[in-house]
């Protein structure tokens, strides 16, 4: 959908086409700054501006200003910002846009002051809370940005993009348990999204321990099912979990340890190892089939990897 829309925008040469494509880009949050800056500026020019509604004019000002900053055209961005400020001298719209302009220039303290001033008027202003998180991230304060987003999500818990960003921040900070929580929240809202399943599986695998490896294996297996076996990373993930749970990696039988603190019975450990081996065998066979069809020259490398993981296919 995004690719089709951007193609439509690149071919736009009349008012209605440009208007429709830019509106869809706003609604779907698609960013292609070069095209948006080019065609948005044309729409705001004298010959087209009179055909736009008042709301469209100012929505385009914001959209094009942000696009201009993305491509480094600060002169265009400043011109649009000044227009917005003249129309809304006391409004949050102008403050937010000015803050983004300051962020682009690296003037973090100026941007932060603007956002905090607006939050004094409305402590629950969602856009300003998110921009404060952006300021912290821009300054390299990953944990500070995470704290800002946590505050934001206490009242905006259905904002999936914010949960994604918070998960990414926690992963950058190597706070994997917190990242896993965020990804689980995302799956509550989008249970069929294979990308979220895959990232949660990777996170749990990184956390380590038998229980996390088993759970990661379940999510990797879910991705295999959701993608009809097309996601090679998920197949590799099942194999990696197998190697951990059968003790090939780490030097001892991982299945004989319990992540909850209590020791597992010997029978349970054997059963876990057998089950893990079966999962690995199925994933390994699927990998070999995929490589045999699409990249047969890599088969020896895949077979060597599987052998090193103790997976018999």
Image (tube, rainbow, N blue to C red):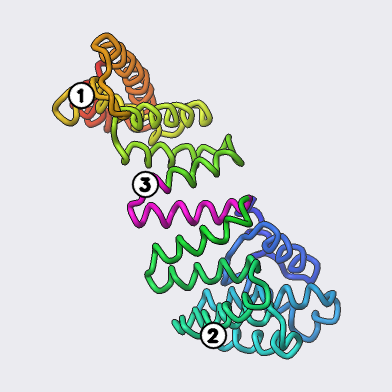
| Relative vertical location of residue 5 with respect to residue 34 in this rendering, above or below | above
Of badges 3 and 1, nearer the viewer stands: 3
In the picture, measured across the screen, residue 78 lies left or right of residue 15, that is left
Which numbered marker is on residue 44? none
Percent coordinates x, y for residue 109 in the rendering: 47, 83
Magenta range is 158-178
Q: Is residue 187 left or right of residue 83?
A: left
Dot 2: what SS? helix
The residue under label 3 is 176
Q: At 50% across and 40% down in the image, what residue appears?
A: 184
**Picture coordinates of residue 241 (x, y %)?**
31, 28
- Which of the pair 276/47 is nearer the observer? 276
Q: Please state the horizontal and vertical placement of residue 236, each as a whole percent of the image.
A: 34, 32
Q: Return the residue found at the far left.
A: 251
How far apart in space, not on screen, are marks 2 and 1 (Cα)? 57 Å
Q: Which mark is residue 74?
A: 2
Mark 3 vs 1, N-terminal side: 3
Q: Residue at x 59, y 64 (%)?
A: 31
């Amino acid at each position: 959908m995004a690719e089709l829309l951007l193609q439509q925008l690149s071919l736009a040469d009349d008012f209605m086409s440009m208007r429709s494509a830019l509106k869809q880009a706003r609604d779907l949050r698609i960013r292609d700054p070069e095209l948006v800056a080019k065609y948005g500026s044309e729409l705001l020019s004298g010959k087209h501006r009179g055909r736009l509604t008042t709301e469209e004019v100012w929505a385009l000002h914001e959209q094009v200003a942000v696009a201009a900053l993305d491509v480094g055209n600060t002169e265009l961005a400043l011109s649009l910002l000044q227009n917005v400020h003249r129309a809304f001298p006391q409004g949050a719209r102008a403050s937010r846009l000015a803050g983004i302009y300051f962020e682009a220039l690296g003037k973090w303290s100026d941007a932060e002051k603007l956002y905090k001033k607006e939050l004094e008027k409305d402590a629950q202003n969602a856009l300003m809370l998110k921009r404060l998180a952006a300021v912290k991230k821009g300054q390299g304060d990953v944990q500070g940005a995470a704290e800002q987003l946590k505050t934001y999500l206490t009242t905006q818990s259905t904002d999936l993009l914010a949960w994604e960003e918070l998960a990414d921040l926690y992963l950058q900070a190597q706070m994997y348990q917190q990242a896993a929580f965020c990804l689980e929240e995302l799956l509550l809202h989008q249970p069929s999204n294979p990308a979220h399943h895959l990232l949660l599986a990777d996170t749990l695998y990184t956390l380590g321990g038998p229980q996390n490896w088993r759970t990661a294996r379940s999510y990797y297996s879910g991705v295999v099912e959701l993608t009809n076996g097309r996601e090679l990373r998920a197949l590799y993930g099942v194999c990696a979990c197998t190697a951990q749970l059968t003790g090939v990696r780490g030097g001892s039988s991982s299945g004989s340890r319990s992540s909850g603190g209590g020791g597992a019975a010997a029978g349970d450990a054997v059963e876990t190892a057998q089950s893990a081996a079966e999962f690995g065998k199925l994933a390994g066979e699927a990998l070999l089939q995929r490589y045999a069809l699409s990249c047969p020259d890599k088969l020896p490398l895949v077979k060597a990897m599987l052998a090193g993981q103790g997976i018999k296919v």
